[in-house]
Image (cartoon, rainbow, N blue to C red):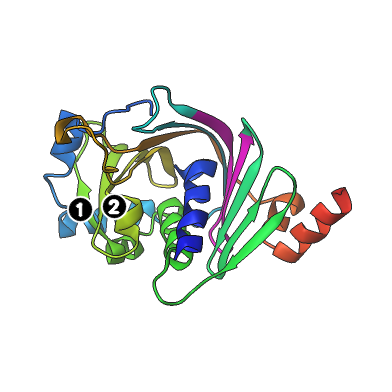
Amino acid sequence: MKKKLTFIRVFLLSGILSFFCNPATAENNLLFSQPISESALYSLSQSFNQSQPLIATFIQQRQLAILKRPLISRGKVIFSPEQGVVWQQMKPFSNTLILQSHGLTQIDSQGQTTIMPMQTNGGLSELMPKMMQAIFSGNLSQLQQEFQLFYVPSNDEKKWQLGMIPKQGVISKAFTKIIINGQSNESTYVIEQLQLISPVQQTNLSQEKQTPDVTTIIFSNQKYRSLTTDELRYFQPQSIKQTTANQR
């Protein structure tokens, strides 16, 4: 269990883990007071279904309760509807995480590759790739299996905000809430911001002063296109190991 939790912490630190450091805003409280309706779920599902590969850059700001200043990182995300998600942190140091249906692969700044096979007992190595695949593809039916969904209509028909609260299990130990902001039209589903809120860590401070760890990721330069040969190679762990070996 410790190995699983350690690996998922690497995942959170490497990218999927604020410009809005305090999640307890009136806007967010409103969001989580309105469970998504069946009609809204159906309507959103029609526009959220994303079947094209996506390339985007990101800036991540992670505010930890134990730190006065946030941790900032930058990088690139590669999404393939068929093969998974590549989270490639470039600054302040390189660290790549590949999330696929059969498991997780990490490449550290030294080029060392670690492969964690998927476990079929509902562990983090199984649930995290499924969650990220569903988020980037806009698969609300998949997300609804693990999360309660909340939705607030926007004055701008193209803008949307989706809230997610884990129903139970391992995911709830990593996150208490997830907030996705984006926009969509007839042909495009775009995530603009992803915010992940972790459980409050018990400290010696009074309960009122205890705050959760909050990570906000801002996406930009989103492009829907076919992946290059080099980008596709990330989804083939054996090719990655051969490449890093050659580099050393």
> Can residue 224 be seen in this snapshot?
no
Question: Is 238 or 142 nearer to us in this picture?
Answer: 238
Question: Is 223 or 126 nearer to us in this picture?
Answer: 126
Q: Is residue 188 above or below residue 208?
A: below
Q: Quadrant of residue 216?
A: top left
Say which residue appears at 32% left-offset and 45% top-offset: 198
Q: Outermost residue, front direction? A: 204
Residue annotated with mark 1: 40
The reply, left or right, for residue 48 in relation to residue 228 is: left
Q: Is residue 75 magenta?
A: yes
Say which residue appears at 37% left-offset and 31% top-offset: 66
Question: Is 28 or 81 nearer to us in this picture?
Answer: 28
The reply, left or right, for residue 149 in relation to residue 17 is: left
Dot 2 alpha-carbon crowd within 10 angstroms: few under 14, some 14 to 19, many 20 or more:
some
C-alpha separation, residue under disc 1 versus residue under disc 2 = 6 Å
**Residue 246: image x %, image y %?**
88, 53
Say which residue appears at 30% left-offset and 63% top-offset: 146
Magenta stretch mostly in which secondary structure?
strand
Tag of residue 44: 2
The magenta stretch is: 72-90
The reply, left or right, for residue 152 in relation to residue 101 is: left
Q: Mark 2 is on which residue type?
A: Leu
Q: Is residue 82 above or below residue 35?
A: below
Q: Is residue 85 above or below residue 141?
A: above
